[in-house]
């Protein structure tokens, strides 16, 4: 009799878990979660796509645990190898992995909606008031910090994904080519791909 | 038809912009100012400044802003869709290939991506360094950058809080 009662309670609990306390399904589905995650990141990162990178990594790898660190590195490679807006590419490919095409569209919408809405708002109303001393001081503090957190994401990803002296040498050499000699990023990516394919081929043979 | 031209222009920008963010701006500049004369240079500079100071990727911000200037809300919607459409197609294709080969022989894919990792990270490091070169002007900003770096590596603090805190520090230090 006690076991039957326990079963009943478990059944009720299972139903509650599914439908929420008030009999309404209040639990967001996966696409909503993906959308909200990217919306949050898109809404609060100022200064472009590379600022979104550390936040996306923290959200999908550390907090939500949707993908692993290694997968994140794979997807970052895919996002950098495709043309277009880097953060958009990253939201698309991570969305694909979590929940297929609908997941990809949810991630994309979340990533672009805040910028679309805020730019429209500014274009329509606020352009006059945009240059204020307060805002300038805020950015004078925030912009150095963005370089710090982007540097930190490189540090974390390098520690997990780079092995041996050779790979660190490539990282520094490629960065020097980009910064001091202003090489085109496309050229760097293509050269990297050729080298990577060559190494893959040699490993196979 | 202006909307069609807008669509084609930003579709092109979506296809040919590599490297993300500010790397795409020269291309947008060429398309918007030199080819179509939709904006003047000062107007375009204002667009870039606003795009860098509002949330979200710079490419999307530029598309929305220029689209609005040329064709109102409809124009901005068309430009934004046009700039992400190539991404949707190409990323989906690459993801499909990636999944297919990953299923076939995991070892080869792992070697390939491992060899690509330093190259990909060099682009991110370059972004960090260029922002630092632009944003770091005095000892106070060096301190903020180093503090943000250490906080985001050593703690589990939400990065949004780190950035907001840095902004507040800016209000205190620079106002």
Image (cartoon, grey):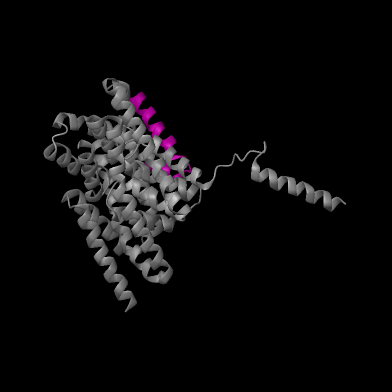
Viewed as shown, does residue B42 lie left or right of A55? left
Q: Quadrant of the N terminus of chain B?
A: top left
Q: Residue furthest front?
A: B1
Q: Residue A197: which quarter of the image? A: bottom left
Predominant secondary structure, magenta span: helix
Residue pictured at 32% horizontal, 40% vertical: B57
Q: Magenta stretch containing residue B125, yes or no?
A: no
Q: Quadrant of the C terminus of chain B?
A: top left
Whether residue B138 is visible here, answered yes or no, is no
Q: Position of residue A4 (x, y in %)?
A: 83, 52
Residue toward you, A101 or B172: A101
Q: Residue B168: which quarter of the image? A: top left
Q: Position of residue A167 (x, y in %)?
A: 31, 62
Residue pictured at 79% horizontal, 51% vertical: A7
Q: Position of residue A75 (x, y in %)?
A: 38, 55
Residue pictured at 38% horizontal, 32% vertical: B166
Whether residue A76 is visible here, answered yes or no, is yes
Magenta extent? B149-175
Q: Is residue A5 above or below residue B37?
A: below
Q: Is residue B159 above or below residue B168?
A: below
Q: Is residue A194 above or below residue B61?
A: below
Q: Magenta stretch containing residue B162, yes or no?
A: yes
Q: Is residue B40 above or below residue B81?
A: above
- How many labels were placed on the picture? 0
Residue pictured at 69% horizontal, 43% vertical: A16
Q: Residue B111: which quarter of the image? A: bottom left
Q: Position of residue A121 (x, y in %)?
A: 34, 27
């Amino acid at each position: 009799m006690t076991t039957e009662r326990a079963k009943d309670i478990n059944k009720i609990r299972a139903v509650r878990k599914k439908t929420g306390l008030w009999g309404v399904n209040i639990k967001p589905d996966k696409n909503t979660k993906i959308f909200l995650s990217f919306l949050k990141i898109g809404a609060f990162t100022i200064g472009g796509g590379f600022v979104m990178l550390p936040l996306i990594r923290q959200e999908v790898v550390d907090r939500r645990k949707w993908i692993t660190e290694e997968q994140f590195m794979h997807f970052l490679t895919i996002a950098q190898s495709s043309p277009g807006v880097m953060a958009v590419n990253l939201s698309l490919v991570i969305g694909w992995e979590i929940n297929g095409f609908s997941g990809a569209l949810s991630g994309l919408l979340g990533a672009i909606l805040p910028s679309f809405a805020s730019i429209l708002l500014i274009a329509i109303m606020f352009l006059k008031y945009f240059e204020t001393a307060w805002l300038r001081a805020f950015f004078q503090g925030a912009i150095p910090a963005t370089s710090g957190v982007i540097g930190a994401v490189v540090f974390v990803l390098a520690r997990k994904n780079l092995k041996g002296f050779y790979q660190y040498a490539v990282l520094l050499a490629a960065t020097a080519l980009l910064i001091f000699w202003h090489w085109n990023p496309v050229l760097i990516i293509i050269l990297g791909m050729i080298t990577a394919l060559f190494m893959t081929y040699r490993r196979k043979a | 038809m202006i909307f069609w031209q807008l669509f084609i222009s930003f579709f092109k920008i979506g296809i040919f912009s590599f490297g993300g963010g500010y790397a795409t701006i020269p291309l947008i500049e060429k398309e918007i100012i030199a080819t179509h004369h939709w904006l003047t240079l000062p107007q375009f500079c204002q667009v870039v400044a606003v795009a860098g100071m509002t949330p979200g990727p710079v490419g999307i911000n530029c598309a929305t802003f220029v689209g609005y200037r040329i064709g109102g809300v409809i124009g901005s919607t068309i430009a934004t869709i046009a700039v992400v459409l190539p991404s949707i197609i190409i990323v989906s294709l690459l993801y499909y290939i990636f999944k297919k080969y990953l299923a076939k022989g995991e070892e080869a894919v792992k070697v390939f991506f491992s060899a690509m990792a330093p190259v990909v990270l060099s682009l991110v490091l370059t972004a960090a360094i260029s922002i630092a070169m632009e944003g770091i002007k005095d000892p106070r900003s060096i301190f903020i950058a180093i503090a943000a770096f250490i906080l985001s590596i050593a703690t589990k603090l939400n990065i949004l809080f780190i950035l907001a805190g840095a902004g507040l520090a800016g209000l205190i230090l620079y106002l």
